[in-house]
Amino acid sequence: MSDAFEKRKKAQEWALKVVEGVNNDPRPFVKCKESRPITDIKDLLNSSGELFADNIMYLQKWNPKGEYEPITYREGLADVNGLGTSLFAKGLKGKRVAVIGPNCYQWCSTYLAVTAGGGCIVPLDKELSPEELKNQIIRSEASAVVFDRKYSDIFIDMKESGDTGLEVLVSFDEGSEEKGVLAWKSLVNEGKELVDKGERAFLDAEVDNEAMSILIFTSGTTGKPKGVMLSQKNVCAELMIAPTIFTLEEEDRYLSFLPLHHTYECTCCFLMAIYKGSSVAFCQGLKYITKNLKETRPTMMLGVPALYEKLYRTIWKNVRKQGKEKLLRKVISVNRITKKIGIDLGDRFFGEIRGIFGGRMKTLICGGAKIDPEILDGLRDFGFNALQGYGLTEAAPMGAFNPQDAPNSRSVGVPFPGQEIKTINNNEEGIGEICIRGENLMMGYFKDPEETAKVIDSDGWFHTGDLGYVDNDGYAYLTGRAKNVIITKNGKNVYPEELEYQLGLVPFVAESFVFEDDNAAGNDTVIVASVKVDEEEIRELAGDGCSDDDIKKLIWEEVDKINEKSPAYRQIRKVLLRKKDFIHNTSSKLIRFAKENKVEE
């Protein structure tokens, strides 16, 4: 028997074992036991192309001012096979190919063509500077890059410099023969012609599901970005185990809003939709989100706390302006009772609110940071299945998720079938470092075995660096990052994220940053809260003519309320009024070591 046959057989046995594990999971909330075995992304694509051939795979606006146009699974598969065949013809078989640009059909088809052909895709962050992009092209040893037109000059200059290994440049849009830039559409058509003539190198290419197929550089908030190596086995494990504690069907439609270069959006939206035969509509950007929701009428969406908090507060602000707050709160209270006996008043009373989300929205998934549980509960009151999860790039990305039939808004959820979660080195409060284990865990950090050994132990547990606890029912809770903990001079632990979370519940606080005053004299640790306010909320509360002192007084009133409920060592002792935006990384996470974030400006 050939080595390829043995690998294929081993992969098939593995996939069947994963599905068997799902079917044998005894937990009552693991209800959606309809997973089909898939060995790799080529298997995913081909099987979905056959099962769901006439289903809509994507909705895309080819003209920004035009209408959304559908692309079926049959068309999507043909385009991927065409693009993959052309990439092989250009000498890129088995090589690393980078991709960068907005969420779109070209991005997704590139990802699929590279991985389904046994190559390695390198998703690049579109917020990076030219210097950072060049660094990642060099570090990843990419031979080609496929990009949106706005990056053309950057990659043309990069290739011409001779400093990188770039051989092929491909534009999502028009090409340029003079500058050596190929057009994505032309490659797709050329490849289809080759396939029609009998070329099968790409179609018959074997995929090793244990090899590095996805290389993602973490954005991080400290130091040099690490290259996370993911295999197709990591990703396919996620796809088989995740849609088991929440419902996802062929008729569902995602609105793809978060950047696809993050595993959160890539795995949980784009690839998950393909696995289940559902569709993905590409959002044109934050400023168009309300319009796109109405145009595409999705049933699913992934977001971060800031998005849902803004939408939720806007809803209530409009309700108050209409003088309907008391009525709406009364309806919500009554509906909570009537729903228990099968009577939902939502269709009659919440139609306008549901219309904001397109009118068909069922599930709102939140990840990336901690969210106010009252917002999740409030969104559920309006009839949305608002669920919070937890993950990291190194976990491809899912580590825990809330079951739709047993959600806990204060928790980040439970592990999926076949996954494990625990805490170690617990302190006197029962808080320790969260560790996860499962088939989804990365292969390691690219060319960095020392850093890999620091986070993955000999028993296969990934040490996340996040702090929290797990309750008796298996639900996990986060309290902060280990590296961010402030250890007071009396040896007590203060978790700045918890204080920032409490400050974030204040309507006029746009963002806060809690840290230790390194210059404070004396024997006590001084906890500082730097606060940036929401100008609109402040004006509504205190009027247009309020001074900085007036704003600080309002902040101190809220800080005092927080301090009243906190032990002395955890109390905020100093407040800074921040005028400028805090400095964040490209994942919108605050950079805590940046000195500029610790000054009042």
Image (cartoon, rainbow, N blue to C red):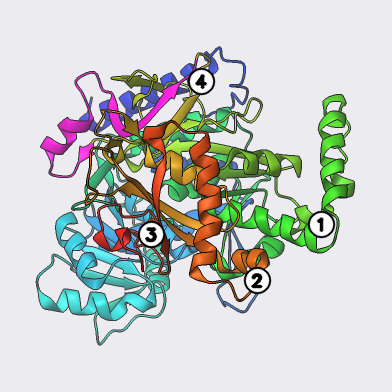
* Disc 4 target residue: 22
Q: Report the Cα–Cα distance between label 3 and label 2.
A: 52 Å
Q: Which residues are magenta?
A: 444-471
Where 577 sits versus 568, above or below?
A: below
The alpha-carbon separation of the residues under discs 4 and 2 comes to 57 Å
Q: Earlier in the sequence, mark 4 or mark 1?
A: 4
Going from N to C along the chain, the mark reached first, 4 or 2, is: 4
Q: Camera-side residue: 45 or 5? A: 45
Rendered-image quadrant of the N terminus: top left
Q: CA distance from mark 4 to mark 3?
A: 31 Å
Residue found at the very far bottom of the displayed protein: 178
Cα distance between the residues tagged 3 and 1: 39 Å
- Magenta stretch holds residue 462: yes
Q: Which amino acid does the dot numbered 1 rest on?
A: Glu
Residue 78 in the image, given as x and y percentages of width and height: 48, 57
What residue is at 19 percent from the left and 20 percent from the top? 458
Seen from the viewer's position, the closer of residues 559 and 408 is 559
Dot label at residue 352: 1
Label 2: which secondary element: loop
Check disc 2 and give the amino acid type.
Answer: Gly
Which one is earlier in the sequence, the residue at label 3 or at label 1? Answer: 3
Q: CA distance from mark 4 to mark 1?
A: 39 Å
Q: Earlier along the polypeptide chain: callout 3 or callout 2? A: 3
Quadrant occupied by the C terminus: bottom left
Closer to viewer: mark 3 or mark 2: 2
Between label 4 and label 2, give the one nearer the viewer.
Answer: 2
Which residue matches tag 3?
110
Pointer 2 residue:
543
Q: Is residue 130 left or right of residue 353?
A: left
Residue 186: % across, % down: 39, 74
